[in-house]
């Protein structure tokens, strides 16, 4: 066990032992908030049936109160407690992808708190796959409302260290379950009539969803922001990002370096980038790029880069989620 000191308050980091799980469950039952590992990113969990606990999550994140939270469940069996009029397609998706990185927006049961749904008539539900959080959920028994464990608008944490760096002092307990395997958030789907709509691309690919449904889901149209993860600027590091194609990365990095900028490079494929102060690549493996994406963005800040030049991966498979996050992260950036 390790303790990270923060001004005024202490954040306690524990491993996934039985003792830690009991402590996490006790803390949650007492209305506390606990950062927990999931296969996508770390979440900041609170008892979804306790309005005070849920309000602590909003306060810790600095998140506007009308932005709804995902409720995490141990399994699909308790779905009917949280949602009603569940479409047949939702059952098929749950069967195929739970536990896993899929969130479904369904008509809420009347008992679901307004604080969780942001007053909407829907609730977002997901069964996470991480073994430690599965154990916490089973021992806890109820639903855990959990946004990503970062301050609003910042990059999501994929290690316990990231949680501590971003939120120390705002969270009492962090359960360390190692590095998140998927590395980008869950795919969020909603149901509109016969249509399945992808509100946020994520760890379950559109291709995998199409294979289960027998047809492609549609993508959410821009306009009203139904999910804050859909805000144009989100998931943003302090470092300016410049997005380009794979072949443009090296010349663009060289041009910026020749202007005296401290430049980093991030790409799916291995890229020569003379003049770059830092370079990361995923060896051509999209899953590796997803897993390391947020860590690289944080590393760019830690190394005080002026600009990170990023090769946008192909818009297929996990590349859709990676491209989505990169575009939002780049939105406010100007090198
Ligand atoms: O992978 C994930 O989904 C992670 C882990 C911790 O499970 N969680 C996560 O939570 O990314 P958060 O709060 O950072 O993003 C949840 C997204 C938000 O964009 C929110 O607006 C959307 O889910 N959401 C929640 N309830 C919704 C609802 N009823 N209708 C539409 N969108 C909803
Ligand atoms: Mg988030």
Image (cartoon, rainbow, N blue to C red):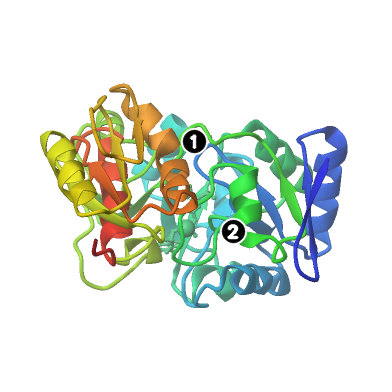
Q: Position of residue 165 (x, y in %)?
A: 62, 55
The tag earlier along the polypeptide, 1 or 2, is 1
* Numbered-mark total: 2
Q: Name the residue at the right extreme.
A: 19
* Residue closer to the observer: 77 or 115: 115
Q: Rate crowding at label 2 as few (under 14), some (14 to 19) or many (20 or more) other CA atoms within 10 Å.
A: some
* Residue closer to the observer: 283 or 303: 303
Q: Position of residue 230 (x, y in %)?
A: 32, 62
Q: Look at mark 1 in the image and give the residue it sits on.
A: 100
Tag on residue 212?
none
Q: Residue at x 17, y 36 (%)?
A: 250
Q: Residue at x 43, y 57 (%)?
A: 106
Would residue 198 be seen by someone viewing this image from the given angle? no
Q: Is residue 118 left or right of residue 92?
A: right
Q: Secondary structure at mark 2?
A: helix
Q: Look at mark 2 in the image and give the residue it sits on.
A: 166
Q: Residue at x 37, y 28 (%)?
A: 287
Q: Is residue 103 left or right of residue 329?
A: right
Q: Is residue 281 above or below residue 64?
A: above
Q: Residue at x 39, y 28 (%)?
A: 288
Would residue 7 be seen by someone viewing this image from the given angle? yes
* Residue closer to the observer: 24 or 183: 183
Q: Position of residue 23 (x, y in %)?
A: 85, 48
Q: Position of residue 153 (x, y in %)?
A: 44, 65
Q: Residue 239: which quarter of the image?
A: bottom left
Q: Is residue 315 above or below residue 115?
A: above
Q: Secondary structure at mark 1?
A: loop
Q: Quadrant of the C terminus?
A: bottom left
Quote the CA–CA distance across marks 1 and 2: 25 Å
Q: Residue 20: which quarter of the image?
A: top right
């Amino acid at each position: 066990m390790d303790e990270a000191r923060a001004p005024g308050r202490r954040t306690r980091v524990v491993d996934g032992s039985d003792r830690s799980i009991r402590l996490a469950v006790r803390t949650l039952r007492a209305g506390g908030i606990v950062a927990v590992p999931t296969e996508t990113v770390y979440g900041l969990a609170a008892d979804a049936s306790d309005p005070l606990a849920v309000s602590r999550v909003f306060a810790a994140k600095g998140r506007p109160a009308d932005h709804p939270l995902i409720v995490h469940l141990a399994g699909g069996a308790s779905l009917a407690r949280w949602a009603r009029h569940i479409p047949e397609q939702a059952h098929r998706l749950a069967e195929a992808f739970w536990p896993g990185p899929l969130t479904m927006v369904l008509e809420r049961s009347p008992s679901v708190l307004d604080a969780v749904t942001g007053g909407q008539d829907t609730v977002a539900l997901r069964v996470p796959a991480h073994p430690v959080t599965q154990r916490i959920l089973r021992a806890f028994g109820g639903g855990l409302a959990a946004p990503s464990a970062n301050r609003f608008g910042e990059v999501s944490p994929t290690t316990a260290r990231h949680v501590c760096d971003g939120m120390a002092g705002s969270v009492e307990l962090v359960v360390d379950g190692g590095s998140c395997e998927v590395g980008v958030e869950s795919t969020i789907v909603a149901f509109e009539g016969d249509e399945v709509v992808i509100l946020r691309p994520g760890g379950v690919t559109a291709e995998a969803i199409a294979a289960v449904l027998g047809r492609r889901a549609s993508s959410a149209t821009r306009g009203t922001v139904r999910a804050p993860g859909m805000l144009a600027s989100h998931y943003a590091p302090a470092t300016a990002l410049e997005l380009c194609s794979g072949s443009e990365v090296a010349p663009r990095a060289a041009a910026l370096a020749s202007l005296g900028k401290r430049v980093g490079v991030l790409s799916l494929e291995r890229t020569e980038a003379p003049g770059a102060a830092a370079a990361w690549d995923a060896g051509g493996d999209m899953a590796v790029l997803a897993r390391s994406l947020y860590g690289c963005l944080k590393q760019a800040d830690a190394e005080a880069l002026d600009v990170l030049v990023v090769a946008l991966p192909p818009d297929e498979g996990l590349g859709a989620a990676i491209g989505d996050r990169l575009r939002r992260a780049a939105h406010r950036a100007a090198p």
